Image (spheres, rainbow, N blue to C red):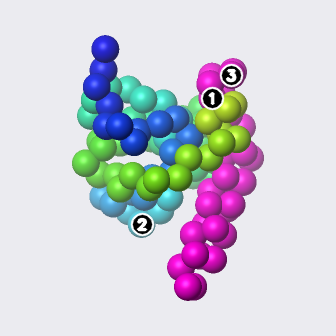
């Protein structure tokens, strides 16, 4: 059994902190092992070709997209449109809360 950090979940939003995509948000679409996950954003990194990222290069956000998580758990897949929608929804919520 793989021992993931307690907050690590499918559908979880992450902020990429290292590499070419630093500063961009993505969604965990697959858990690989205790060090690596696959992330996608539905735009540059599609679900069919996700980016393998080391957990130390990601900042875990305590927000899980229920739509993406449900789709991944039920079918094992998610549409790129749903990934884009979930990220836009998260960013709108995040920016609203940032104003206060």
Q: Residue furthest bottom?
A: 100
Residues packed near mark 2 inside 10 Å, few (<14), some (14 to 19) or many (20 plus):
some
Give the prevailing secondary structure in the magenta stretch.
helix
Residue at x 44% of width, y 55% of height: 61
Residue at x 69% of width, y 21% of height: 75
Q: Which residues are magenta?
A: 72-100
Residues packed near mark 3 inside 10 Å, few (<14), some (14 to 19) or many (20 plus):
few
Percent across and percent down for residue 4 are: 32, 31
* First in sequence: mark 2 vs mark 1: 2
Disc ID at residue 41: none
Quote the CA–CA distance across marks 3 and 2. Answer: 30 Å
* First in sequence: mark 3 vs mark 2: 2
Percent across and percent down for residue 9 are: 47, 36
Q: Answer whether labels 2 and 1 touch (C-beta < 8 Å).
A: no
> Residue 93 in magenta?
yes
Residue at x 67% of width, y 32% of height: 70
Vertical position of residue 20 compared to residue 34: above or below: below
Percent across and percent down for residue 56 are: 25, 48
Residue at which label 2 appears: 23
Q: Answer whether labels 1 and 3 touch (C-beta < 8 Å).
A: yes
Residue at x 42% of width, y 66% of height: 23
Percent across and percent down for residue 66 are: 65, 42
Vertical position of residue 3 compared to residue 66: above or below: above
**In the displayed structure, does residue 77 sit left or right of residue 1?**
right
Quote the CA–CA distance across marks 2 and 1. Answer: 25 Å
Q: Quadrant of residue 36?
A: top left
Disc ID at residue 74: 3
Residue at which label 1 appears: 72
Quote the CA–CA distance across marks 1 and 3. Answer: 6 Å
Residue 52 in sight in this render: no
Q: Quadrant of residue 78?
A: top right
> Residue 91 in magenta?
yes
């Amino acid at each position: 059994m793989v021992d993931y950090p307690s907050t690590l979940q499918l559908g979880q939003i992450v902020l990429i902190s290292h590499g070419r995509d630093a500063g961009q948000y993505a969604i965990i679409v697959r858990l690989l092992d205790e060090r690596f996950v696959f992330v996608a954003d539905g735009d540059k990194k599609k679900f069919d070709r996700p980016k393998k990222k080391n957990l130390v290069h990601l900042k875990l956000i305590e927000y899980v997209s229920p739509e993406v998580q449900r789709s991944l758990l039920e079918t094992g897949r998610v549409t790129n449109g749903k990934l884009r929608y979930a990220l836009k929804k998260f960013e709108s919520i995040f920016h609203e809360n940032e104003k206060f």
